[in-house]
């Protein structure tokens, strides 16, 4: 699983299956969209206005180390 966060758009994306495949979007609520892949499986979840729905500090790194 990979977690992507765009702080400018406050958008959180959880990707469960990285394989290239045809995706169909299914909106659950105004702020939550499921990406449905092969076999009707959920391959990703997009959360708009993420900071209002998720405690981001509990899933995102709080410290960064840049190799120089």
Image (spheres, rainbow, N blue to C red):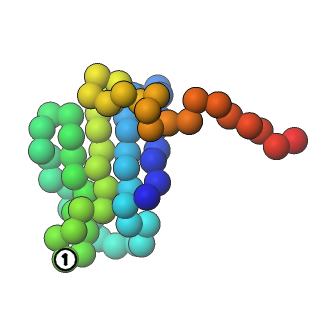
Q: Residue furthest bottom?
A: 39
Query: Which residue is drawn at the image coordinates 26% and 28% (left, top)?
Result: 53
Image-based side of 25 in relation to 11, left or right? left
Between 18 and 53, which is closer to the camera in this rendering? 53
Q: Residue 25 vs residue 28: left or right?
A: right
Count of numbered labels shown in the rendering: 1
Residue at 38% x, 38% y: name it: 12
Q: Secondary structure at mark 1?
A: helix
Q: Position of residue 34 (x, y in %)?
A: 22, 52
Task: Answer with the quarter of the image where residue 21 lies.
Answer: bottom left
Residue at 12% from the left image edge and 44% from the top image edge: 28
Residue 30 sits in quarter: top left
Residue nearest the observer in this picture, 61 or 48? 61
Image coords of residue 66 (percent x, y): 77, 39
Q: Quadrant of the N terminus?
A: bottom left
Quarter of the rendering occupied by the C terminus: top right
Residue that carries the numbered disc 1 in the rendered image:
39
Residue sitting at 17 percent across and 70 percent down? 40
Which residue is outermost to the front? Answer: 58
Residue 19 in picture, x, y percent from top left: 42, 72
Q: List x then y, in percent, for residue 3.
A: 45, 47
């Amino acid at each position: 699983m990979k977690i992507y966060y765009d702080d400018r758009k406050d958008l959180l994306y959880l990707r469960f299956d990285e394989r290239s495949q045809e995706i169909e979007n299914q909106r659950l609520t105004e702020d939550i969209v499921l990406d449905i892949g092969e076999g009707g499986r959920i391959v990703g979840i997009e959360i708009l206005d993420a900071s209002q729905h998720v405690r981001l500090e509990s899933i995102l790194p709080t410290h960064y180390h840049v190799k120089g």
